[in-house]
Amino acid sequence: MLLWQDIVLTIINFGFMITAIPAIYRNYQHKEAKSQSLSMYLITAILLSVMAYVFLTLDMLLSCVSTAGTGIMWYFLTYQKIIYSK
């Protein structure tokens, strides 16, 4: 059964993904990731992964997929932070 909460959380997560795109692109263009600390990127990515799993166990599949997508973007930001900090 599709819950309205699932739809709202999915829309919010797609909003988060859209707002992360400029940061990823800027990091790629300038070959630097100065805006946040590595721990902030990594902790956010891990917590989003946990949230995606929780949504999966609640059968909120749209929220699970969209939160996992947001988490992947934060893992990508973490990767950029590691690579561009060398």
Image (tube, grey):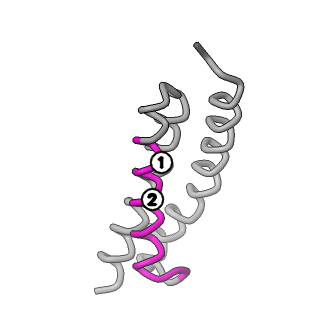
Q: In this view, does 1 lie above or below 28?
A: above
Residue that appears at 61% across and 17% down? 2
Looking at the image, residue 74 sits to the left or right of residue 83; the answer is right
The amino acid type found where label 2 is placed reads Leu
Name the quadrant containing residue 45: bottom left
For the record, the magenta segment spans 35-53
Spatial CA span between label 2 and label 1: 6 Å
The amino acid type found where label 1 is placed reads Met
Position of the N terminus by quadrant: top right
Q: Name the residue under label 1.
A: 51
SS at badge 1: helix
Reply yes or no: does residue 21 show up in magenta: no
Residue that appears at 62% across and 35% down? 10
Q: Is the magenta stretch mostly helix, strand or loop?
A: helix
Looking at the image, residue 84 sits to the left or right of residue 32; the answer is left
Question: Where does the image place residue 73, in percent across and percent down from the top left?
Answer: 45, 54
Name the quadrant containing residue 84: bottom left
Reply yes or no: does residue 39 show up in magenta: yes
Residue that appears at 41% across and 51% down? 50
Label 1 Cα crowd, 10 Å radius (few <14 / some 14-19 / many 20+) = some
